[in-house]
Image (cartoon, rainbow, N blue to C red):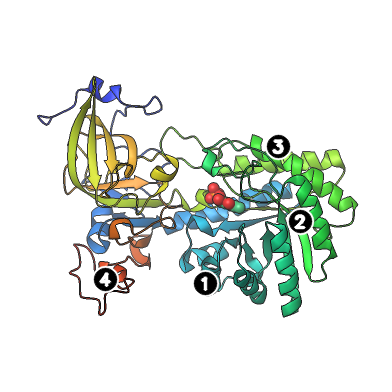
Amino acid sequence: MHDDATAPEQSRALAPDWLAEPDDPNDLAAGVWPASAHRAGDGALVIAGIPAPELAREFGTPVLVLDEDEVRARARGALAAFGDAAARHGGRARVYYAGKAFLSTEVARWMIDAGLNVDVCSAGELAVALAADVPPARIGFHGNNKRVFELERAVEAGIGTIIVDSEIEIERLAAITERLDRRQSVLIRVNSGVHAETHSFLATAHEDQKFGFTLEAAERAAERVHELPLVDLAGLHCHIGSQIFGTGGFRESASRVLELHARLLEAGILGEDPVLNLGGGFGIAYTRADTPTPIAELASGIVDAVADECAVRGIDLPVLAFEPGRSIVGTPGVTLYEVGTTKTVTVGEGERRYVSVDGGMSDNARPALYGAQYSARLASREGTDAPVLSRVVGLHCESGDVVVDHEYLPGDVTPGDLLAVPATGAYCAPLASNYNHVPRPPVVAVSDGRARIIVRGERIEDLLARDAGIDPVPAVRAGEGEE
Ligand code: PLP
């Protein structure tokens, strides 16, 4: 043990209740890491057959590593889960990958290969999907403030579904479809009033928020769409939040939305094969304390509940649609960092080790934004000392710059070690910033012992190029690991 070692009782004093002290601080908790993750004979973390030190040498740190086979498998798994669950009731289900979780042309192609559709929520995401040759009919477009040019591009491209979010948007679409003389199919986003059991920033279906129509307003919106010559109402949409573990919220929300669905059917406002899209939000394990429901079980629970509600109302099961993001791409992603400095602080009876890494809130904003919890492990080797309560922090000038708030790491974590943070595949790269003029890291896909960049990392020169006061941009010496 090191001289400054923390006694176990001092470590525990500051640990939250949910964090259990591991027998082995090098173990890789099942469900938190990609299935391919394991430790090599020398103790290094291996993902899809590639040791972490090799990835760090080739691509530098930080780097977001995405296990391609696991992303693809999860996409196929989601489609099979919802498809099979619907088929048991004689119905059909579509799955849209929620591109906001992480979108690049590669990932969009993986989704199409797996039989999924792709959901976008800006002209930028739409451009990525189109650049990936996603068939326009397989694209859905979300957003509470889609700008006129974005709607025009979507209609011109012939995308499958626009999920309309406001009365103003409906009028904009009426004008655009007439101007372009194009038909457009839409879903109406309903805010069912159901609160998902999750962090309040992630719960998107209670009334006091910006998305969608209340149930009453949705009925009027449906009537308005029905009057429009070139806008076709395909059905209703509802998304209740994210990182949800149970089926209760989905059941309740589906029940309320089906009430409206049944009324619209009766009024002849919904046509053939109406769609009910219940959104995404299926939770994943960020730490071993999270116990998400397997997707097949969730799918059965939700679809069975919808089928029950339809039976009660004497209506056919609609074509069901779902929009998972994080549950497809979250777990397959692991971020590798290099440890720069460490220190131990004493707080009352307790002690905590601070481990600073070479990234932080610029590559993972979720802890600062939502208080999201993550876990971490040494990746270049196995530690030898007993576990100590640690906080992994970034390099930014901000005390809220936390990567992993609470984790037990081996007491011998030291500068130059590689640290891996799992479950960073979703909502990390898309939320990345250049805070403190820190370049955004690359995203590397790994599969079967091979690694390739799917999103290039930035260099300081890229950031200087945006500064209108710098011309020409001087060469900046690349950092270690940069090309
Ligand atoms: N659909 C909609 C409308 C969303 O807003 C979101 C996330 O915010 C998703 C789907 C995807 O959620 P998740 O990545 O949690 O599955």
Under mark 4, the amino acid is: Glu
Residue under label 2 = 235
Q: Nearer the viewer, residue 424 or 392?
A: 392
Q: Which mark is residue 461?
A: 4
**Amino acid type at mark 2:** Gly
Q: Element at badge 2?
A: strand
* Label 3 sits on residue: 252
Label 4 element class: helix
Q: Quadrant of the C terminus?
A: bottom left
Image quadrant assignment for residue 401: top left
Q: Residues within 10 Å of mark 2 (few under 14, many from 20)?
A: many
Spatial CA distance of label 3 from label 2 is 18 Å
| Label 2 CB less than 8 angstroms from ligand 1 | no
- Helix, strand or loop at label 3? It is helix
Q: Nearer the viewer, mark 1 or mark 4?
A: 4
Quadrant where the N terminus sits is top left
Q: Which residue is mark 1?
A: 132
Q: x, y (%) of residue 270?
A: 83, 57
Kind of residue indicated by mark 3: Glu
Query: Disc 1 versus disc 3: distance between alpha carbons?
Result: 37 Å
The answer as to whether callout 3 falls within 8 Å of ligand 1 is no
* Whole-number angstrom distance, CA of label 3 to CA of label 4: 51 Å
